[in-house]
Amino acid sequence: MNVDEIIAPLERLRQRYNIKLAQFQTSYNKIEISAYEMEQIITKGLDIDLSQIEIYSDNTFVYKGVRVILHIRDIKKYNDQYTMPKFHICNCPTYQTMIQSGRKHRYVASSRDDGIFVINKQDDFDWQSEEVALQVCKNCLNLLNWSGKFNLKAFFNKYPKNLLSGYGHAKDINAPLNEYSKDWGEISAKLRAKANYICSSCKKDFSSNKSNLHVHHKNGLKYDNSISNLEVLCQTCHSMQPFHGHMRKQRAT
């Protein structure tokens, strides 16, 4: 007996006694995170567009239904030293400052819970990838009123990785390196010439001292050479931009 043979007499009874069918509507939230993304998030981390990050009601980060932590992957050496970034577990003031300064795309998302992160270090002109232990942002701990010693296993125990209402994650090992494009010298020279070698901030003329006129990447991504992301600035004005404290230190020495 097939399904139609089973349903047919029931349908005749329904019509005979004028029984109305109940109307059911089903809905669900589709979680679009792929198996590949999940693998990257729980291992090496995933490069993401932070516009996809949801700030959950408890101020933690959620991407496509998975709670994540964020960190900067590409770092450079200043004064022969590397300064390791902190990782963020929630929407703290430090993270908000980065967002407000236009540096949305410098972060990588992960839900790895052993405290080890993939970091790319630039040594002269080469990049070296390695796994390192990073420290949590203290402003994040303050925002969550975290008490006692912190570790990621305890964090994800209190704030589970999987959420029924979900949003998402991404990968850091395959994110593009935050370095200048091969034609950066040409792009910079053309843009400074187009500006008549005048700083867009202080309006001083550097036509006789062109080496002190720079081109600034507003969002901090050296490979993003879109016109809206570039600004002609003198060395002094450039050093006053957010997260350019290393330039001020270099000028002082």
Image (spheres, helix red, strand yellow):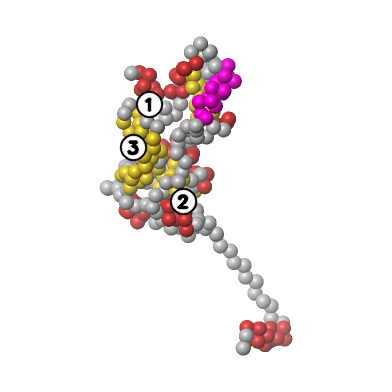
In the image: residue 220, left or right of residue 228: left
Which badge, 1 or 2, is on the more N-terminal residue? 2
Q: Secondary structure at mark 1?
A: helix
Q: Residue at x 39, y 49 (%)?
A: 44
Q: Is residue 126 magenta?
A: no
For marks 3 and 1, give the CA distance.
Answer: 14 Å
Residue bounds of the magenta highlight: 183-196
Label 1, label 2: how many angstroms apart (C-alpha)? 31 Å
The reply to whether residue 101 is in sight is no
Q: Amino acid at mark 2?
A: His
The quarter of the picture where the C terminus appears is top left
Out of 80 and 10, give the one closest to the viewer.
80
Q: Quadrant of residue 132?
A: top left
Q: Residues within 10 Å of mark 1 (few under 14, many from 20)?
A: few
115 shown above or below 9: above
Q: Residue furthest left?
A: 149
The answer to whether residue 189 is visible is yes
Near mark 2 (Cα within 10 A), the count class, few <14, some 14-19 or many ≥20, is many
Callout 3 crowding tier (Cα within 10 Å): few <14, some 14–19, many ≥20? some
Tag 1 and tag 2, C-beta contact below 8 Å: no
Which residue in the protein does label 3 denote? 84
Query: What's the amino acid at mark 1?
Result: His
Does residue 235 sit above or below 125 in this rendering? above
Between 122 and 10, the one nearer to me in the picture: 122
Per the rendering, the mark at residue 246 is 1
Q: Position of residue 184 (x, y in %)?
A: 51, 29
**Residue 28, position as x, y percentages in the image:** 56, 62
Compared with 2, 25 (above or below) is above
**Residue ID for mark 2:** 169
